[in-house]
């Protein structure tokens, strides 16, 4: 694996860096820095999406023919890395990285023409209706029922943990169309208009007080057959394709590295009570060094995957490995922050947002105020997109042949 940048790739990186230095709005950067949740709220995320869209870079993982950049895997990685190092918000993946590749790979011409531009323009905000009460890891057991009635489906059931359903006007959804078929074979992939009677969204507040996820109830919801992606009963294949993108769609190491650097810089501002700062404390140094080594190892694996993808090979089950490692590291780093701020890191501010003119005053510092909400929210990393145990099963089966 060659990890030196060619002069062209270095020039590309510099171009991205210069763009971020001049075009990343300060309010967006500050909003991202003070968001304890996995996804930033639309008042931050959609502003950044619009800036990137104006530049033609929002579809940075999209093929050119669908309005994307057509960048190479390495260019996409460099873009993500520079964005992370500049403190830009994580892009909301649901439309851009999850449903868009399903639509351009399996959708028909009309679906591509209608839906893809609306993702880039921000007209559509998507949520993911896969999990149900009782069907998470065992997703194929899902019960949400769709019955064909002429040229439309009538959908009844419930979805849970639906991220940002309260902001979304569209939901991509797995439904059961054939209850008698083998469980994987009876599933179909539908695109649902959320703005219709029969859909209700009930908030689920996290232990940190954030409203990020919901339960969605569907009662006699109407979906035209034209909004079915792929054939009836093909939904499981589309779901597997989408989940592989969800697990491996981004590089995690640069953002983890950025957060660790920020934390170490904060340690240099925190007194150790003995005339020095916590940055010089041997225990702190050991913990940071251990985390840094693990992040660097993760980055090497991510670069290796990029190198494979560049040669035309699918990333495959290795994405389960990076998802698992990144999730554990995310939690380790967020725990380090609670550790760093001591009692001030244990305060649990429930008011939101923690950015903007109405943000509550911190007791110690904004960073300390974020430590506990971040720590609690990052518990979700080892659950969403498939739990750690599920990733370990995939690695055992597909990578280790157990
Ligand atoms: C913050 C957050 C956001 C989410 N967003 C969305 C979303 O937008 N859309 C959506 O559809 N879903 C979403 N999810 C749901 C997520 O995908 C599920 O929570 C996840 O797949 C686990 O399913 P479950 O909650 O039903 O737990 P279960 O499947 O009931 O698992 C319970 C425990 O049993 C373990 N377990 C289960 N099966 C096995 C096995 N075979 N081997 C070993 N251990 C096993 C699990 O690892 C876990 O520890 C989100 C979840 C969270 C926390």
Image: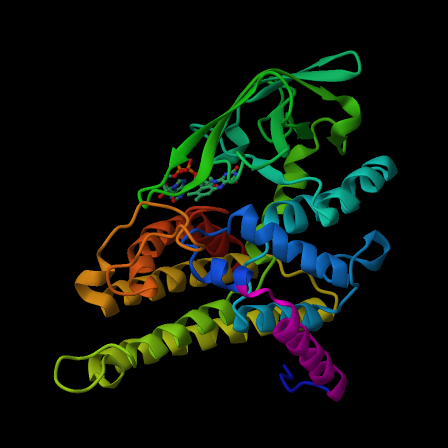
Image coordinates for residue 235, horizontal then vertical, percent: 67, 33
Residue 324 location, quadrant? bottom left
The spot of residue 322 in percent (x, y) is 50, 62
Q: Residue lying farthest front? A: 357
- The residue range painted magenta reads 7-26
Image location of residue 294, percent across then percent down: 40, 73
> Can you tell which quarter of the image residue 20 is in?
bottom right
In the image, taking residue 392 as reference, residue 199 lies left or right, namely right
Ligand 1 placement by image quarter:
top left
In this view, which residue lies farthest toward the left? 274
Look at the image and name its color scheme: rainbow
Marks counted in the figure total 0
| x and y percentages locating residue 86 in the rendered image | 55, 72
Q: Is residue 92 visible?
A: no
Per the picture, the main secondary structure of the magenta-coloured stretch is helix
Picture layout, residue 153 above or below residue 257: above
- Residue 75, compared with residue 57, is above or below; it is below
At x 68%, y 59%, the residue is 51
* 372 magenta-colored: no
In the foreground, 54 or 382 = 54
Q: Nearer the viewer, residue 343 or 232?
A: 343
Residue 22, magenta (yes or no): yes
- Can residue 274 be seen from the camera position used here? yes
């Amino acid at each position: 694996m060659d990890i030196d940048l060619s002069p062209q790739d270095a020039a590309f990186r510099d171009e991205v860096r210069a763009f971020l230095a001049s075009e990343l709005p300060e309010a967006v950067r500050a909003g991202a820095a003070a968001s304890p949740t996995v996804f930033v709220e639309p008042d931050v995320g959609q502003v950044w999406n619009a800036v990137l869209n104006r530049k033609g870079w929002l579809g940075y993982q999209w093929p050119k023919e669908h309005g994307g950049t057509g960048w190479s895997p390495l260019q996409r990685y460099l873009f993500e890395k520079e964005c992370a190092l500049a403190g830009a918000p994580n892009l909301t993946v649901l439309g851009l990285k999850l449903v868009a590749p399903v639509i351009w790979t399996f959708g028909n011409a009309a679906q591509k023409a209608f839906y893809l531009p609306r993702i880039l323009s921000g007209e559509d905000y998507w949520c993911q209706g896969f999990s149900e009460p009782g069907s998470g890891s065992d997703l194929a057991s899902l019960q949400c029922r769709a019955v064909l009635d002429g040229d439309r489906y009538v959908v009844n059931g419930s979805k849970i943990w639906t991220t940002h359903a309260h902001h979304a006007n569209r939901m991509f959804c797995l439904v059961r169309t054939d209850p008698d078929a083998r469980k994987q074979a009876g599933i179909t992939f539908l695109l649902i208009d959320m703005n219709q009677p029969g859909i209700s969204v009930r908030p689920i507040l996290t232990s940190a007080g954030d409203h990020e996820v919901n339960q969605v109830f569907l009662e006699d919801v109407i979906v035209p057959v034209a909004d079915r992606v792929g054939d009836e009963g093909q939904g499981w294949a589309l779901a597997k394709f989408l989940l592989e993108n969800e697990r491996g769609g981004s590089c995690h190491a640069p953002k983890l590295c950025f957060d660790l650097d920020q934390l170490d810089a904060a340690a240099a501002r925190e007194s150790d009570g003995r005339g020095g700062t916590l940055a010089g404390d041997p225990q702190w140094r050991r913990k940071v060094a251990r985390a840094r080594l693990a992040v660097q190892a993760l980055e090497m694996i991510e670069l290796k995957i990029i190198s494979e993808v560049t040669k035309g090979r699918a990333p495959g089950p290795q994405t389960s490995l990076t998802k698992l490692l990144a999730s554990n590291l995310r939690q380790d780093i967020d725990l380090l922050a609670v550790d760093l701020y001591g009692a001030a890191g244990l305060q649990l501010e429930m008011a939101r947002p923690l950015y903007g003119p109405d943000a509550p005053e911190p007791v110690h510092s904004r960073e300390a105020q974020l430590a506990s909400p971040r720590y609690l929210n990052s518990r979700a990393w080892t659950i969403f997109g498939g739990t750690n145990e599920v990733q370990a099963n995939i690695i055992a089966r597909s990578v280790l042949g157990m």
